[in-house]
Amino acid sequence: MMVMMQVAEQKDTKVVLTKPFSLESGSDSDPSYRAPNLIRRVLALLKNVRPGSDLTKFQLPPVFNIPKSQLQCYGESVYSTRLDLLSRCNSGENPLERFTNVVAWSISTTRPSPFGIAPYNPILGETHHVSKGNLHVLLEQVSHNPPVSALHATDDKENIEMIWCQQPVPRFRGTSVEAQVLGKRQLKLLNHGETYEMNSPNLFIRILPVPGVDWVGNVNIKCLENGLEAKLSYRTSLFGGRGRYIRGQILDSSSTKVIYEVYGHWDSIVQVKDTDNGKEKEIYNAKEVISGLQAPIVKDSKSVWPTESGIVWGELSQAILNKDWEKAREVKQAVEERQRNMSRERDTKGLYTWTPKNFVVSYSKEAGWECSPIHKLVPPAPIIAQ
């Protein structure tokens, strides 16, 4: 699954980067990161957790970790694609074509995830900075409790900007865990003066009766400038089987006229049907977009920030890849203890509010978390996505 990696020396540290989640990542055929007797171990891990509990502060042993941070997973969903769907969004000849392409791109950010293992919880101030072609992507962990991640991406050639603010809230449901992903995603096609706003589906981890991981819930995509809206529903199958359905509509919000019916599977083919003439067309093919993805490479190790995910967690990721679980436990505890020490030091100095380096962050009960990038453009990164 993720046995291929990129390692670059940086003084006494290593940048360890593993393959992104791809179409193959949800397969049960690769046991590389699966603990023995996985179901029993997951149930034992959660036996003292009450149903409905918020798992935000729940710390997993390294044997249950994928060798990458959640911050990297967010970034990968944007820059790790085999096809340039963002260019297609920009090149649409009319608002409906562009909107339909944005819907396809939004679906492409939904990635399969293996059962029973999870990425690391990012530490405060952790960053992830990667470029692919002219697209430059920068993420920062702007809050630790609650965990909030900010993303800013720009493509100066296509004149595209992307801003995300993500807050996962996982809760234990007795036989499942559902992680609600709060926050707003914006995609701006500046050449057309269009801003698309959307949310994320929720990650659903089913323990019983049939273990599996899927995305569920409703996703709304709106463009105020052209008045188009998509209402998508992500559905799963509780007893295994095909699952991973998408159903929905693309409509004109001013007249509520349904233009397209949307249907398919987000890990396979998604199609639309014209409600006027009944014509069908494919808008998304997961195999073409998110299969066979490769780990990013380090182009300039001296320019990688010390806060980069691949450095912060590099030693732990290497231990997990080597299946050296004793070393992994030591390293993970050391990273977490450093974060606690930094928090205590800030409290001692009276610095109770963390100031991110790349974003202005605010919170209100009405709007939730808002993350605004400080700089207009994201600079080219020393790490390159393949």
Image: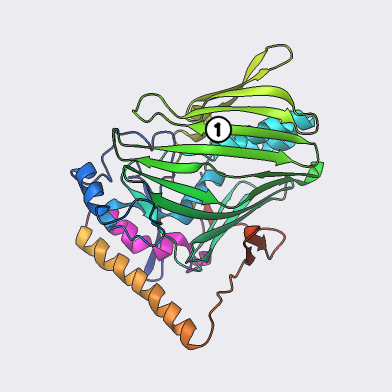
Judged from this view, the residue extending furthest toward the bottom is 349
- 336 inside magenta stretch: no
Query: Vertical placement of 79 versus 310: above or below?
Result: above
Query: Vertical placement of 9 versus 205: above or below?
Result: below
Judging depth in this view, the residue of 310 and 104 nearest the camera is 104
Q: How many discs appear?
A: 1
Residue drawn at x 55%, y 54% is 166
Residue 168: where, in percent of width, then height?
48, 53
Residue drawn at x 56%, y 45% is 78
For label 1, the SS is strand
Neighbourhood count class around disc 1 (C-alpha, 10 Å): few under 14, some 14–19, many 20 upward:
some
User: Is residue 296 among what the camera can see?
Assistant: no
Residue 93: where, in percent of width, then height?
79, 29
For the N terminus, the image quarter is top left
Residue where numbered disc 1 is placed? 233
Residue drawn at x 52%, y 49% is 181
Judged from this view, the residue extending furthest toward the front is 51
Magenta region: which residues?
A: 298-323
Amino acid at pointer 1: Ser
Q: Quadrant of residue 340?
A: bottom left
Judging depth in this view, the residue of 131 and 371 nearest the camera is 371
